[in-house]
Structure formats: structure tokens, C-alpha cells
Image (cartoon, rainbow, N blue to C red):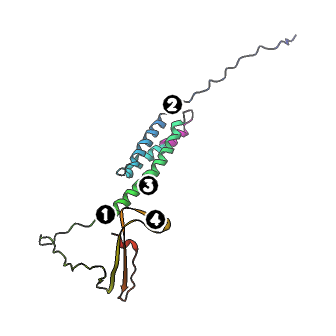
Amino acid sequence: MTDNTPAAPQLVEAPAASLPTKNTLSLVALILAIAGFVLGVIPATAGLAWLLLLPAAILSIVSLAKKGTKKGRATAAPIISTVGWIVAVIVALVSIVGGANQAINTPDAPSVSDGGSAPEEPVVDEEAAIGDTVTNDDGVAFTVASITCGIAVAGPQFLEQTANGQFCEVKFTLLNGSDAAVSIWSGELLV
């Protein structure tokens, strides 16, 4: 005889859902990213920020690839390191350009000649007055017609600039008495 009674249901235990574990690697990546960002904002250290931002990016990518770990910090670290890298590059470039501009616009200190004494002062002709014509060795003549100071705003319509103090307008004529072409740019005339 066969037993047709149904078998008692057996309880099958489901494997316990594994909770994400702490991700120490992502914490290290986040700390490096924040420290690199801070270095990138400071002009003197912006060039060194990559020393922290590059390892932060690499560690955060490795941390994101690990299974079974929390991803919050691992997601924030590459974002902070990428933004920090961009900021560091911009700050470094602005610092370099600003330093180069300052070096170009700073007059050189007088040098000492071989004899140990200060160099002789160049012979300066008397100053030219408004209306006088000054001609250089190449035959280019420059005559100032008028100077008007006290101008608060200057420049073309959409590129107007407000003076920190005042602008001065100088009206002049330039006569090329040489055989070579002469080009001038308004930036050369700014003092």
C-alpha cells in the first residue's frame, strides 16, 4: 500500500542578506581627495595637488569595484578629486600667468658694471611739451596734440571699463619717416 499523505513542508532557510561592510579604502580616497582639493585652491601648492588627487581617484575607483561594500564615500571621492584637479590646473595657470605678467611689468634693477661702480645715467634730453614733435633714430615722429584726464569710463560700447582712479585720453599723431613699416597697438601705449 502506498501512503498518499503529503509530506510535511520543509523549511528552507534563505541565506542571510549580507549587509554592506565598511569601506576603509573609500575613506582613505575621500580624505586624499579633500586634502588634494585644498592644496589645489592655494596658489603656492596648486602644482602639487595632483600628488594627492591622483591616488584619490585610483583608490576611489578600486573602492567602487569592491563588491559588498558601502559606496557613498567611494562615489564622492572621484567627484571631489576630478573637481579638485580642474581647480588646481586653473589656479596654477592663473598663478603662472600672473607671475609672468608681474615679472614682465617690473622694471629691472640697475646692474653694476665691471668696474664695480654704478652705470652712468643715460643722457636725457629735455622733456617734450604738448605740440612738440619727437623723432626717434629710425625717423618715426610722434606729436602729442592734447591730454585730457579725469575720465571715469572708457572703451567701446560693450567693453567699457570703469577706472579705479581715472583714465587719461591722449590725442597724438604718428608720422613714419622710415623705409620700414611701423605697427602700433593700443596696449603698447598704456602706462
- Residue that lies at the very extreme toward the top in this rendered image: 1
Upstream in sequence: badge 4 or badge 2:
2
Which residue is more in the foreground, 89 or 5?
Answer: 89
Question: In the rendered image, which residue does mark 2 sit on?
Answer: 22
Q: Residue at x 71, y 17 (%)?
A: 11
Q: Nearer the viewer, mark 1 or mark 4?
A: 4
Q: What residue sits right under mark 1 in the picture?
A: 103
Q: Earlier in the sequence, mark 2 or mark 3?
A: 2
Location of residue 90 (image quadrant):
bottom left
Disc 4 target residue: 160
Q: Amino acid at mark 2?
A: Lys
As drawn, is 84 to the left or to the right of 188? right
Instruction: Give the overall secondary structure of the magenta segment.
Output: helix
Magenta segment boundaries in residue numbering:
59-69
Q: Which element carries disc 3, helix, strand or loop?
A: helix
Q: Nearer the viewer, residue 174 or 83?
A: 174
Q: Amino acid at mark 4?
A: Glu
